[in-house]
Amino acid sequence: MKKIFRAPILNPLDENSWRFYRDGALSVDDGVVADIGEFSSVIERAGSDPEVEVLDGVVVPGFVDVHVHWVQHRVRGIFAGELLTWLQEHIWPEEARYADSELAGAAATQFYTDLLRAGTVAGMSYSSPHAEATEVAFRCMRGDWVIGNVLMAVHAPRTLTDFSLHDPDTLRVFMGRIDQAHYALTPRFAPNLTAESLAALGRVAADAGCFIQTHLAESVAELQWVRELFPDAANYTEVYDRAGLLTPKTILGHCIEMCDEEWQCIRDRGSWVAHCPTSNEALGNRRMPLERLRAYGIPFALASDIGGGPSHSMLHVMQRFLVSHRDAGVAVTPQEALYRSTKAGAQCMGRASVGGDLSAGKRADFVLLPRKSAAESIEGWFEDCLRGPAADLEQRPQGTWLRGGHVA
C-alpha cells in the first residue's frame, strides 16, 4: 500500500551538492521510494487518497558504514594505544571469545539493534575467523550488510588462527553456503598471511568475483612489520597487488602511510578506500591524507571502524571527518560528509542501484534527525546535528526506517 511521509527532506546528490525539500514528501510503495519532492507536487501525483504520516524532524537517507568490526562492538572505546599492541593485548583476546556461538548470537543482535538506533542501515563488516560466528551475523542481519570472516594464518594466537578458513578448498566450501551478494573475502591484513596464502586467496576471489576487504597502511609500526615480512615488495600495496587482491570490488581500510606509487596503483585497479577518521584519532595514527586521495581521484566512503573507532555513530564519524581535515587546512563540506556516509557507501558496496539516497526506485531506508536548530541555513542545521559527544550522537536520530517500516 502506498504511503507518504511528510517532512523536510535532505537528499545527497554528489560530494558537492544535495537537494533540500523544505515541505518534503517521500512516497513509499512496497518498501521502495515511488516519488520524492515538495509535498504539494508529490500529493498531486499520488492520485488516489494515500495515507500520509507527518514526521517531526528532517529526513535523510539511512547511513552506510563501509568498515566495521562487529565482533569488536562490545569493546568499542574501551581500549586504545598503538595499533599492533592494541590488537594483541585487547582485540584478539576479545575476538577469540566468538568461538562461543551463544555469545556471538547475543552480540550480533545487540550490534544490529545499536546501529539501527544510530541510523546505520547498511555497511561492510568484519567478523571473527569463526565460521559459526560469521553465519550468526548473517542470520541476525538487519539492514543490508556485506560480511566476511577474517582470514589469518600466522603471527596471531592459535585461538584465532586454528579457526581461520584461509585454506582455499575449505574457504570455497564455506562460501558455497553464503549468499555471495552479502559476502566479502577478508584477509585481515598482510602480516597475518604469507605471500603464498595471499595469492591463493586472490585466485579464490577472482573465481568467485566477490568483494574483498582488508586493511592497508594504517600505522607506521604496521608498515615496518610488512617491510620485514615481505622484503621483496616495493611497498605495502604491492603485497596485495601481486596477490591479485586489488580489484574494483576491493575496499581498503585506512590507507594513511602511502607513497605516490601506491596511490597510483589503487587508482589503476579501481579499488575503494574506507576512510575511518574516528579510529585514526583514537589509536593515535596520522590523519588520512585526503588531499592525495582526491588528487588521484580514488573513490572513498566514510566508516566507523569500531572497535578502533570509539563509536558506531556515523554522525560522530562525519563530525570528526569535518574537524580533522579542516584543522589541517583541507576544505571539506557538510555536503560531502553526508554523501560519503550514504550514497558513496552504497556505491562502494555495490548497492548504488538500490540504496544510498532517496531517489525513486530505491529502498525507503531513512533516518529522522531533529529539526531544532538556531542555524539559518540547511548547512548550518546539518552541522548542528553533528555537534556533541559520541554518546549523544548515537542517540540523536529520532527514528530509523527500513523499507518504509519504523525499526528503531
Image (cartoon, rainbow, N blue to C red):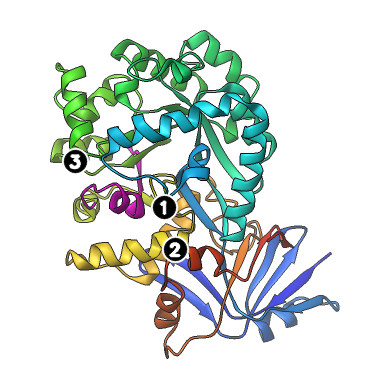
In percent of width and height, residue 57 lies at 61, 79
Q: CA distance from mark 2 to mark 1?
A: 8 Å
Q: Label 3: state its secondary structure.
A: loop
Q: Residue at (42%, 86%) from the top-left corner?
A: 377
**Quadrant in the picture for residue 22:** bottom right
Q: CA distance from mark 1 to mark 3?
A: 22 Å
Q: Residue at (43%, 15%) from the top-left corner?
A: 158
Q: CA distance from mark 2 to mark 3?
A: 27 Å
Q: Is residue 330 left or right of residue 123?
A: left
**Quadrant in the picture for residue 46:** bottom right
Residue 53 visible? The answer is yes
Q: Residue at (62%, 19%) from the top-left corner?
A: 176
In percent of width and height, residue 65 lies at 48, 50
Magenta-tinted stretch: 270-287
Residue 211 visible? The answer is no
Residue under circle 2?
Answer: 390
Residue under circle 3?
Answer: 257
